[in-house]
Amino acid sequence: MPQTILTIATRGQGLYEFTEEAAAFVRRSGCETGLLTLFVRHTSASLIVQENADPDVRTDLEAFFRRLVPPADDPAMDYLVHRLEGPDDMPAHIKAALTQTSLAVPIGGGRLLLGTWQGLYLFEHRDRPHRREVVLHIGA
């Protein structure tokens, strides 16, 4: 079965679309019908399927998650114990736990069967730039 690791360079917290890279992998595989499984190999980043037409959706999602899970140095988060890697670390783990580390997207006619406005995103939850790895695997 075809498999690859996609490396995504992030510039800090935010949504990074990689729909085209995943679609290109499916095209190169020659798979007509199957399932693309995606898995992020990190505990402080996640994967989501989200609208890719209006950038305001990404802006609002990022703002929502900042309000939902503020940095560890925010008084609302004083209950946190894990603080070794900075004020963004444990909140990043919480955000990853609230979202997904893997996705499955059907393949039909040799292409991803995403909806009209759907895109694949790496959701970076840390402040610093990182190089994140996403495993792409096609199964029948």
Image (cartoon, rainbow, N blue to C red):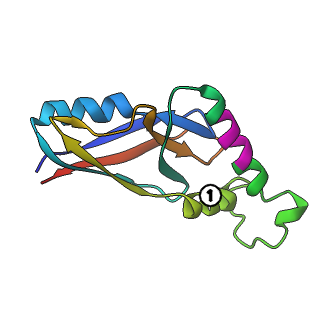
Q: Quadrant of the C terminus?
A: bottom left
Q: Residue at x 54, y 58 (%)?
A: 99
Residue 92 relative to residue 67: left or right: left
Residue with the most extreme front position = 116
Picture coordinates of residue 67, whole percent (x, y): 78, 51
Residues 135 and 56: in front is 56
Q: Is residue 116 above or below residue 139?
A: above
Q: Position of residue 56 (x, y in %)?
A: 66, 29
Q: Label 1: few (<14), some or many (≥20) within 10 Å?
A: many
Which residue in the protein does label 1 denote? 95
The outermost residue toward the right is 75
The number of callouts visible is 1
Q: Quadrant of residue 97?
A: bottom right
Give the residue type at disc 1: Lys
| Vertical order, 35 against 115 (above or below) | below
Is residue 70 at least partly visible in the picture? Answer: no
- From which residue to which does the magenta span run? 58-64
Q: Is residue 63 part of the magenta span, yes or no?
A: yes
Instruction: Name the residue at 87% across, 64% down.
Output: 76
In the rendered structure, the answer to whether residue 87 lies left or right of residue 113 reads right
Residue at image position (46%, 55%) is 42
Q: Main secondary structure of the magenta part?
A: helix
Q: Is 17 on the left-hand or right-hand side of 89?
A: left
Residue 17 spot, x, y in % from top left = 46, 33
Looking at the image, residue 69 lies above or below residue 136:
below
Note whether residue 91 is visible. Answer: yes
| 70 left or right of 8 in image | right
Percent coordinates x, y for residue 66 in the rendering: 74, 48
